[in-house]
Amino acid sequence: MSIASLLLVAAACGPAESEDESVDVEQALDALDVSQNEAALVVGAIARVDPKSVHPDLAAAKAAATAGLVFRPADCVTATRKDNTVKYLLSGCIGPFKTTNLDGTLDVVYSVSANGLHALASVRDLHASRAILDVDSEGFYSLDADGETRRLVVEASGEGQGPRGHRIERAGSYTVTWNATEKCVTFDGDWETIVGARAFHTTVSGLARCAGECPAAGGEIVHERKALDIRIRVTFDGSARATWSSSRGQSGTIPLFCGAGA
């Protein structure tokens, strides 16, 4: 069934008026965690490659040759290249932004266009931190004018299970920027989120974090279902708990998997 069909079915069902919206908050955070773990994999595939490369075969060769510098320890990854495709076999790896417990196979096809280097990534049943990923994504990699900030714009679809146990289906895009020296990352995204009978539009803005730390103060998630006039806002204050509030009057806090709780 298509994403559009699933959205229509889910909209028709809808949550009961009295339902505890903390479940929707969990699902919004699981959708974010799935996306961030997916982003770390794509970043790992392009981290050592020149974003201005115009030769996809050479980009693939460089990515394969330097995989042990990105996924640690070096013997946790086996990277096999054929033409412009690299297959990564990960076993207990730590990846970019201290993404831990990477286990599974990542396939990446490299290509180039006028807007930079592309990495088409596919994973099935790949474990990343507390998440499980089954996704296809295409990342567009470029370097900002300051010569330091790396930018990855990702179009993604597929499923994943977040650390809170919710099976998430997503379709949309997100942008990741990072500075290789500071090891900090910003994340902004916009996608449709489907979990069982629930369908929401999820927007992430201004989320910033450094490797191994909790999200900095100022970022937020807006998780909304306009047909039912439900809007949930999740905000971050730099601690290991996020605060949420709903347009229907509910509110609370929720623990995050970060810092000492990572």
Image (cartoon, grey):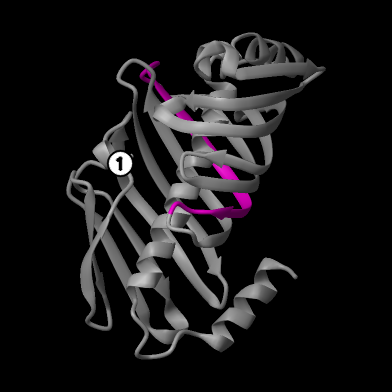
State how many labels appear. 1
109 above or below 258? above
Q: Could you tell me which quadrant the N terminus lies in?
A: bottom right
Magenta part of the chain: 146-163
* Residue furthest out toward the right: 83
- Helix, strand or loop at label 1? It is loop
| Residue in the foreground of this view, choosing between 224 and 88 | 88
Q: Residue 145 in the image: x percent, y percent?
A: 40, 21
Residue 223 makes an appearance in the image: yes
Drawn side of residue 41 relative to residue 189, left or right: right
Q: Residue 248 in the image: x percent, y percent?
A: 27, 83
Residue 214 makes an appearance in the image: no
Residue drawn at point x = 38 percent, y = 53 percent: 204
Residue 240 magenta = no
Residue drawn at point x = 69 percent, y = 75 percent: 5
Residue drawn at point x = 40 percent, y = 70 percent: 24
Q: Which residue is tagged 1?
A: 258
